[in-house]
Amino acid sequence: MKLNGKVAAITGAARGIGKACAKRFLDDGVKVVISDVDAKGLGATAAELGRPDALRTVVGNVARRADVDQLVATAVKEFGRLDIMVNNAGVARNRDILEITEEEFDEIIGINLKGAFFGVQAAAKQMIAQGGGGVIINMSSVNALLAIPALATYAMSKGGMKQLTSVAAVALAPHNIRVVAVGPGTILTDMVASSIYTSEDARKTVMSRTPAGRGGEPSEVASVVAFLASDDASYITGQTIYPDGGRLILNYTVPVKEK
Ligand SMILES: NC(=O)c1ccc[n+]([C@@H]2O[C@H](COP(=O)([O-])OP(=O)(O)OC[C@H]3O[C@@H](n4cnc5c(N)ncnc54)[C@H](O)[C@@H]3O)[C@@H](O)[C@H]2O)c1
């Protein structure tokens, strides 16, 4: 219960990794405001998580600054402050690099990178106004470093997030605000089902590059988020931590012996 009594906001939390972070925070005694563009999914998740004493929802699109500001304002209105911001909302689209339209580029960069930037700004302003301190966690990806051509816009957005995390960490260190990122490998969520595991061959290719021999669970990302949000990580800022089952350190492919 190292986070007991803290207040957190999470974007893109109607399902997947964001939802797992909300569950983990609630279990750890955190008061949580979850946000998502999917109003129906958000309501269903809130009902499933229960905890009306410690959980609030805000429907919003992270690509719109006013919606992200509204999320932070709700945390303050409902729970009095903001200690932890998780900029998790993200989308991926499979597309040949030669076919990406301006609209598609703007959509992915607008949600994944601009949305996280809005989250960093809104959270930091509130944290400074309440006297400093706090942790901002950006949900990056191994694609911040790896080049998968079918996911070009996604990779560009996560590459930008690496620098967003670094520059914000330096800029906000004087306010005792840490800014970190988590870069998962392949985690078993709807995003992976629709954009990564597009065929059995695609799934096997991912496994051939995953020494752990399995996809990760959303809870295995949430536990890293919980660690980074806690004082156990008090000297970590500006870094991206990669829970990836060994993906990034691998040079050769591994024999496919799935667990
Ligand atoms: N699943 C993986 O393997 C994986 C790996 C690396 C990084 N990530 C990152 O983790 C984060 C969560 O991914 P996930 O796998 O849980 O995906 P997911 O698709 O299961 O969930 C993403 C959530 O974000 C919401 N969302 C989408 N656009 C939004 C917007 N404009 N404003 C607010 N909410 C929006 C969706 O409605 C959804 O509830 C993303 O940033 C993703 O890039 C995922």
Image (cartoon, rainbow, N blue to C red):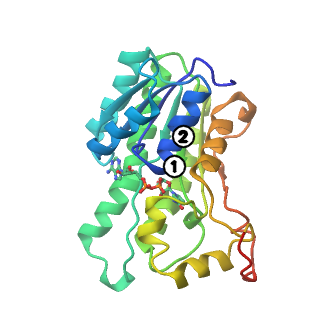
* Residue 61 visible at all: no
Q: Amino acid at mark 2?
A: Cys
Image quarter hosting the N terminus: top right
Q: Amino acid at mark 1?
A: Ile
Residue at the far left in the pictured view: 103
Mark 2 burial class by Cα count in 10 Å: few <14, some 14-19, many 20+: many
Mark 1: is the Cβ under 8 angstroms from ligand 1? Answer: yes
Q: Ligand 1 appears in which quadrant?
A: bottom left
Q: CA distance from mark 2 to mark 1?
A: 6 Å
Q: Are marks 2 and 1 in contact (CB under 8 Å)?
A: yes
Residue 30 position, x and y percent, is: 55, 24
Q: Nearer the viewer, residue 195 or 183?
A: 195
Mark 2 element type = helix
In this rendering, the answer to whether 214 lies above or below 218 is: below
Residue 119 position, x and y percent, is: 42, 39
Mark 2: is the Cβ under 8 angstroms from ligand 1? Answer: no
Looking at the image, residue 63 sits to the left or right of residue 237; the answer is left
Instruction: Give the number of the disc on residue 21.
Output: 2
Q: Residue at x 51, y 49 (%)?
A: 17
Mark 1 burial class by Cα count in 10 Å: few <14, some 14-19, many 20+: many
Image quarter hosting the C terminus: bottom right
Instruction: Give the number of the disc on residue 105.
Output: none
Instruction: Give the number of the disc on residue 17.
Output: 1
Looking at the image, residue 195 sits to the left or right of residue 180; the answer is left
Q: Residue at x 66, y 49 (%)?
A: 239
Quarter of the image for residue 102 reads bottom left
